[in-house]
Image (spheres, grey):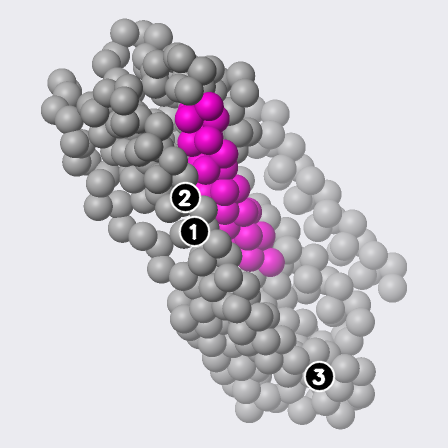
Amino acid sequence: MNREFLIYFTTLMLLSGFYLLFKDQPINAQVKYKVKRKLAQRIFPFLLVFIFGYLIIYTIIKSIEISLAIALLFLFIPYLQEKSQARKRSKSIRSAWPEMIDQLVTGIQSGVSLTEALLTMRTRGPNPLKPFIEILSKSLLDGDNFEVAIRKMKTACNLAEADQIAETLILAKTLGSKDIGIVLRTLSQFLREDLAIRIEIEAKHGWIKNSAVLAAVAPWLLLLILSTQPETIAAYSTGIGLTILLAGVLLTVAAFFWMEKVGTLPIRNRVLAVRVLAASPS
């Protein structure tokens, strides 16, 4: 017991020192160091989850082979967290566009121009869009024309919906003040309908994906329960048992990525990524 405690304590100290070493370094270092630092920060969560997963499972069942196999599956935890954060970010951005369009319509109806209405979004625009609105506003205040500023905003956003909105704003600017309100209201209605459809489809896909995840995890939970018996540990300590464990890990990984591919809505192609309706200087 003292030996295991010493191993755990040493591992934690090494991981803590590894993290603090890269955390305390100055940000403005050389490019080569920045790449290494970024790579280390990328790998660190996976390494931490794997080691902690192995130590926890080994403490429970005292089997190196089974602990390693289950710890390999723990590597999905940081990956799932990153995917979840990316989905939440994209969803919050998509949900904020109709609100921004409505505020633009309100501003235009009060008598301000489209450019002035966009500049006011810096203070009262939706929070998820603040970074992109700031890029647009800075470009306009620096003297760039409307099309160039819109292009910078949609490039920073990197979403097909942003391309549609950017091109619609350019079209509305080209048509003039008479039809801007009509164009923007039509765009807002289209965005809300599209968002409602995507939410409905994602809810159905989410139920299917959760069922698939449960089906993939259930055998490993059963193995973990059975591993409390010495006979199970002895069976998987052989060469055939280790082969079965590795095959199970590979099949689980393959099934997971296949489920991700089938159960995820395709990302729209940015067909308007470089095309602008109105000619603009480079």
Q: Position of residue 7 (x, y in %)?
A: 76, 56
Q: Is residue 138 visible?
A: no
Say which residue label 1 marks: 193
How far is disc 3 from disc 1 in space, using C-alphas?
Answer: 44 Å
Position in image of residue 145 (x %, y %) = 23, 14
Quadrant for the C terminus in the image? top left
Q: Circle 2 — which element?
A: helix
Per the image, label 1 sits on a secondary structure element best described as helix
Point 49% across, 34% down: residue: 99
Quarter holding the N terminus?
Answer: bottom right
Judge by depth and name the residue closer to the eye, 2 or 155.
155
Tag 1: amino acid:
Glu
Q: Which residue is outermost to the right?
A: 2
Marks 2 and 1, how far apart at CA: 6 Å
Q: Amino acid at mark 2?
A: Gln
Residue 62 located left or right of residue 66 = right
Residue numbers of the magenta segment: 77-106
**What's the residue at 22%, 40% (across, down)?**
272
Observer-nearest of 217 and 273? 273
Residue on which the image places disc 2 = 189
Q: Main secondary structure of the magenta part?
A: helix
Q: Nearer the viewer, residue 188 or 275?
A: 188
Q: Counting residues from the N terminus, which is met first, the one under dot 3 or under dot 1?
A: 1
- Work out whether residue 2 can be spotted: yes
Q: Residue at x 67, y 91 (%)?
A: 235
Q: Please state which amino acid type lies under the numbered disc 3.
A: Leu
Q: Position of residue 279 (x, y in %)?
A: 12, 24
Question: Dividing the picture into quarters, in which one does residue 228 lie?
Answer: bottom right
Of circles 3 and 1, the one toward us is 1
Q: Which residue is mark 3?
A: 222
Q: Label 3 vs label 2: CA separation?
A: 50 Å
